[in-house]
Image (cartoon, rainbow, N blue to C red):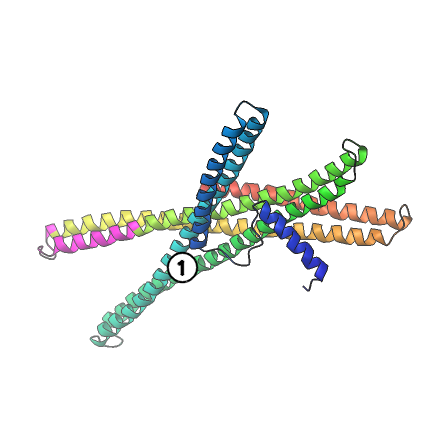
Amino acid sequence: MLRSKNQWKNVLKVAAIAAVMGIAPLAARAETVDELQQKLSQTDRQLAEENDRYEVRVAKLGKSSKAGKDEIAAHNDRVNDIRTRRAALKDKIAEIQVTESTTQRVAGKLDSSQDVLAKLKVDHDARGAKLVQGSKAWEAENDRYTKEVRAVQERRATLKDQKNDIVRTQADNQRIENKLDDSAEQLAALRVSHEKRSAGLVQGSKAWEIENDRYMNEVRAVQARRDTLKDRREDNRETALAEKRIDDKLDSSADKLAALRADHDRRSANLVQGSKAWEQENDRYTAAVRDVQGHRVDLKDKKQEVATDQRQLLSLHGELDDIERKLASEQDLFRQNKAAMKDGSRAAQLENDRHADRVRALEDRKHDLREELAKAQRQSASAR
């Protein structure tokens, strides 16, 4: 979208105000861990500088004086703001690290499964070369190979679904960050507009109160959207952490299976095949493997449940976004239509009724979606 010279001036002005308020500009891309670590280091310096400045100011003003008490209150606010930003940066770094770790794990398993398929093919060709085509042994080998390939292909399909889920979640997280940055700029712009409108009004007058109410209502609306976005980001973070915990347990159980196999081979090496001791060892090994495999099935089912819940959450958040866009479009349309109508005219009354019905329908749908989302969030939290 092209912007005029004056529009660009307004954008730059809002951005400058946002910078003064400590609000980040709209992100064009996701920040790296190194960039976030640099910002975290900056907050360390800011905190140290604030503490040094505070000591000098309070020593000069005196803690018991009014100016000193005001300085203490302002200092506490600034420190709380820095600590809040620090906590947000740490959460973001942890979120990226978890995502990167999961992405690398999935990519590694996909590569590994491709190698497994190649090895199965080589092994099958070697076995088949020694068998008479069409014989019972040859058919049994074909069945074994087909089953093992099918199992690997199913695992690959699951991994590809996981990879797609990661991509969708990363994209959603970036949209959330962009919208949070955008809403921060909106708050800054609202503040500028409010100060301009209030400048010519008498404090305490009716007009002043109306302006204050307008400003606070708009701020509350933006803050409500920000809270929803933060909840959505938290859902994504908790889901990623839950999936990582399950993946860690699956990796641990895979290591346990490998250890059981190595131990079984070592024990069986000195036993006579078909002997009582050999049968007991086989029974012991089979029971141990069955127990671990059962645990792995439970873990995979749980992971599938977490992934399904996450897709539902993303879908509901997407529908809520669509409702918000429709509400904003309706407000724009209503203002345009009203501007072309005479106040109190029949057309204006009809437009008021149309607008009220449309907004009511959208707000009802938003209410229903929020209830569905709250239920889905409870279900997702229980699954995690």
Q: Is residue 348 magenta?
A: no
Q: Is residue 273 magenta?
A: yes
Position of residue 191 in the picture relative to residue 207 (left or right): left
Residue 8 seen: yes
Q: Residue 384: image x %, image y %?
A: 43, 43
- The structure residue drawn at horizontal position 47% and vertical position 40%, both measured from the top left corner, is 49
Viewer-proximal residue among 279 and 250:
250
Q: Residue 322: image x %, image y %?
A: 64, 53
Against 197, is 269 above or below?
below
Q: Amino acid at mark 1?
A: Leu
The quarter holding residue 74 reads top right
Against 359, is 68 above or below?
above
Dominant SS of magenta comes to helix
Position of residue 354 in the picture relative to residue 234 (left or right): right
Q: Residue 333: image x %, image y %?
A: 77, 54
Which residue position holds label 1? 159
